Image (cartoon, rainbow, N blue to C red):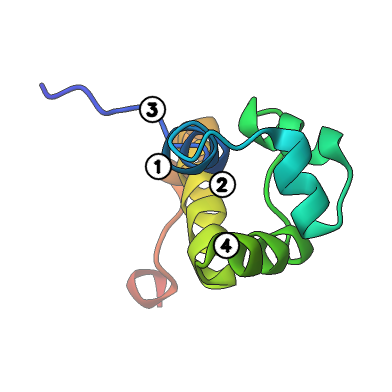
Amino acid sequence: MAKTLPPLHPGEVLREEYLEPLNLSPGKLAKACGIPRTRIERIASERFGITADTALRLGKALGTSAQFWLNLQNDYDLRVAKVAIAKDLEKVTSVQEAA
């Protein structure tokens, strides 16, 4: 049976694809975004997620789209939830099958 990879937190993408390669500190990115440094630090350390507000700011500062960041966050949230409620999901039936 193939092992599934753990969900990719958007903070890992921020850290590995932007902060480190661009030699960009959380403080410098936060200043460019107009948000507290601690918000970037918490996202990069995978302790906080990305909100719509943060996605808009990151998109503008890093030359990406806000949707890019929100898609990463949504994918992460869905994967985590799927694992968390796996047993309950097994009990869910289709309303079309039940009819």
Q: CA distance from mark 3 to mark 1?
A: 21 Å
Mark 4, residue position: 70
Mark 2, residue position: 77
Q: CA distance from mark 4 to mark 3?
A: 18 Å
How packed is label 3: few (under 14 Cα within 10 Å), some, or many (20 or more)? few
Mark 3, residue position: 6
For marks 3 and 1, give the one nearer the viewer.
Answer: 3
Q: CB under 8 Å between callouts 3 and 2?
A: no
Q: Which of disc 1 and disc 3 is earlier in sequence?
A: 3
Q: At 42% across and 41% down in the image, what residue appears?
A: 17
Q: CA distance from mark 1 to mark 4?
A: 28 Å
Residue 75: give x, y in percent of width and height. Answer: 46, 52
How packed is label 1: few (under 14 Cα within 10 Å), some, or many (20 or more)? few
Helix, strand or loop at disc 4?
helix
Judge whether 73 appears above or below 44 on screen: below
Lateral position of residue 81 relative to residue 6, left or right: right
